[in-house]
Image: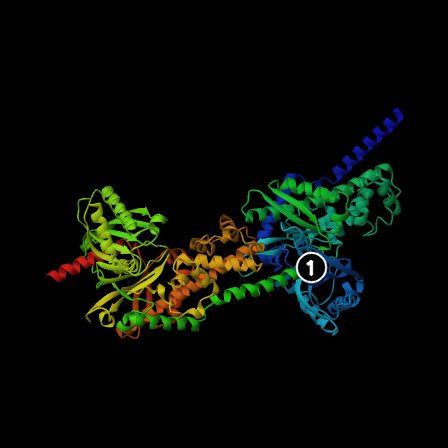
Amino acid sequence: MFAIHLIAFHFTKLKEDQIKKVDRYLYHMRLSDDVLLDVMSRFRAEMVKGLGRDTNPTATVKMLPSFVRSLPDGSEKGDFLAVDLGGSQFRAHQVKVFDDGKQSSQLESKFYPTPKEVIQGNGAELFDYVADCLSDFMETKNLKHKKLPLGFTFSFPCKQTRLEEGVLLTWTKHFKVRGVQDTDVVKSLRKALQKHKDIDVDVLALVNDTVGTMMTCGYDDPRCEVGLIIGTGTNACYMEELRHIDLVEGDEGRMCINTEWGAFGDDGALDDLRTEFDRELDLGSLNPGKQLFEKMISSLYLGELVRLIILKMTKEGLLFNGKASPALLTKGKIEMKHVSAMEKYKEGLSNTKEILTELNLFPSEEDCIAVQHVCTIVSFRSANLCAAALAAILTRLRENKKLLRMRTTVGIDGGLYKTHPQYAKRLHKVVRRLVPNCDVRFLLSVSGSGKGAAMVTAVAYRLAAQRKQIDAALSPFLLSLETLREVKHKMRTELEYGLKRETQGSATVKMLPTYVCGTPDGTEKGKFLALDLGGTNFRVLLVKIRSGRRRSVQMYNKIFAIPLEIMQGTGEELFDHIVQCIADFLEYMGIKGARLPLGFTFSFPCRQASIDKGTLVGWTKGFKATDCEGEDVVDMLREAIRRRNEFDLDIVAVVNDTVGTMMTCGYEDPNCEIGLIAGTGSNVCYMEDMKNIEIVEGNEGKMCINTEWGGFGDNGCIDNIRTKYDKEVDEGSLNPGKQRYEKMTSGMYLGEIVRQILIDLTKQGLLFRGQISESLRKRGIFETKFLSQIESDRLALLQVRRILQQLGLDSTCDDSIIVKEVCGAVSKRAAQLCGAGLAAIVEKKRENRGVEHLQITVGVDGTLYKLHPHFSRILRETVKELAPQCDVTFMLSEDGSGKGAALITAVAKRLHNVGQK
């Protein structure tokens, strides 16, 4: 028993001594975590370099765009072919993807040899061979009668400009085919396939095997957004934000980047980590000075690296009594399969002894221990370096998503990972140590390069079909120049109807006289009160106007809420609430005793008989107070003040907010004769020649006309451009059949149009995995402010997803792109329609003045114009296009409904005083 313990002790001591000896000898191959974190940092810098347009040409890590923009979502279906060129064998595959709700697929494959004369011959022979093999496969599977889409896995660095195009940059993995480099390999394959008249194959996608691995695993696990190959070659790909990829146009969504990380270090970035053995191996390779990282990692080179180390140790008398056999002197005699076998620790030293004996080395026990440990250090270094580069990718992904902690899946393939007994465990452990804030699942790919190519093709097929459906839904929102001209002409016709006595009664654009007959001239002065009612808030303002050299306008205001029950209660309750708010403000300002002139901004359609008389034509913007329509709102306000019996006010003018906007800008620019509101509602006013206003007596001078253009189209004249979504929004509104133009152009309704489109697309299975959430069913959930946020150029898709999540919509990256596109289509149409209407007004002003070219200013207010990132630009461009003889300046109004009401009151007082004199 003692003897057994003694032998065990002796073996353990012997093993420790041999391991220490090898550790000392291969000290530079043992990498600490600090070194790995440094490698990780270097690789991240190379990634950034590869993604930049200016730095990419000199980058070693090429970061090649794959034009794969989307991962499988489970709705793919159909029959697909794939061919796989890049390993020791050529493979042809048939992949059936079933739409059975279980994300199931069926793969049938056939393997063909890749003879040396083919992989080191000329290009025409290579692609003819691929086409011949595919033809044979289709014959075997009885597929020659079918037209099938094909994915081409080509596992070599290619520069792609489209999914179905790829120019070979360089051969790797012992391939040296002449005349292929710098040519489009898809074009070459198609040319070879055309020689086979009996098959009909459409090459839809060129795929790198790494991308194929990610796509195969992405079909089984939606979290998979990284692909990794560790086999004969090594590479990684991942889903990058498009806004970071300078080499590709556009910044919406993501695209898979094929890093081609095998060339990392070709510029000397890893020279401090490369050993004499790495250098010797590189010099003896087919491509000296290239793919240096791959030569430190991949199975194609690790066996040779082990041989070079053992050979040197033998020559130095550290192994085999200093005697090297001819086999040990022969390049390629130790392969990766030998290294893997020797590292099967459970089998002790038997495998190592057997392999070394086959090499005629007659090893001792010490030799076997030392050689086994050399294998361990070489393969461990490979796993460490691979982990460091992968950790860099994972960190970039996490930072792109702005997450403190990330859950993700890495799809993985390759002989080294699959067959080496320790490699996978080592890789996982080191990755988790280097990126502790990433919860990483490693998912082994099944037929990644073949099935993956089919999945890329299937996704491309799905996206093409979806694109057609999305285009069909949004095409009615794309208005041609001809259509916009037609809208302009129809608006002009309706403007004329509203001005004429005999047609005004039936006109949809009411062209209401405001009895505002002048714009500010700078002599206005005094203290004025202004009331502003036009939305869910009500404002009371005190406005102090100074004239002369110290000309200025000072304002003090207070905002009061109008509860829904008041908005939709009785008229008496509404006006009592307004007077209560005025009383609070007068008390607050300490001016309850003063009888101040007041301008009342009432932003609803009113028919005015004079400047201080306004009869409500009809409520809009969600108001439904009873006993108001057909009543004079100034009288209702006066009666409410009398009921309260606390103060008295001189109500000089009832004002529309659009007129207030024009007057505010007119105070700064005398050329301003048009006011536009593009906000919750939509409206325009302008100064019209009195001779054209048939419903008001007199021909001299001008009067401001409140067009109330929101009703344009209520007679059906623009039904040809109304979509089914517009009709749904109209039918669900408080005033069906009314304000149709406003419902296509104003902020109150645009979000609701978007919601209707999103519901339709979701029903078609194009959004949100086909699931209509409870929140999406809620009318009004999609406010117009979300359109402005989502369409912001500065907003990444990740932030768009967060906005949608706030709305209870769990969206993917692809969903976010579609939602952004829907918002863009709806808001662009709104701006164009608004521009077409405004073009009709400015053209009318030009004709009124009888000039060839008109210079005019439009005062503008409203959140849609001010806050939406594109609305104002599209509106201006449309006016310029449709009214080329008018030079229109747009001036942002500063509080048109408050300051404007005070200015109208001041102008009215000035004109009244002039009249009295």
Quarter holding residue 833 = bottom left
Front residue of this view, candidates 172 and 162: 162
Crowding at mark 1 (Cα within 10 Å: few <14, some 14-19, many 20+): many
Going 43% across and 55% down the picture, which residue do you hit? 784
* Quarter of the image that includes the C terminus: bottom left
Going 47% across and 66% down the picture, which residue do you hit? 723
Viewer can see residue 886: no
Seen in the picture, residue 787 relative to 472 is either above or below; the reply is above
Going 72% across and 58% down the picture, which residue do you hit? 450
Horizontally, residue 524 falls left or right of residue 371, namely left
Query: x, y (%) of residue 421?
Result: 77, 44
Query: x, y (%) of residue 795?
Result: 48, 53
Horizontally, residue 52 falls left or right of residue 871, namely right
Query: x, y (%) of residue 278?
Result: 73, 48
Name the residue beneath numbered marker 1.
97
Quarter holding residue 766 = bottom right
Query: x, y (%) of residue 476?
Result: 48, 67
Under tag 1, what secondary structure?
A: strand
Front residue of this view, candidates 35 and 205: 205
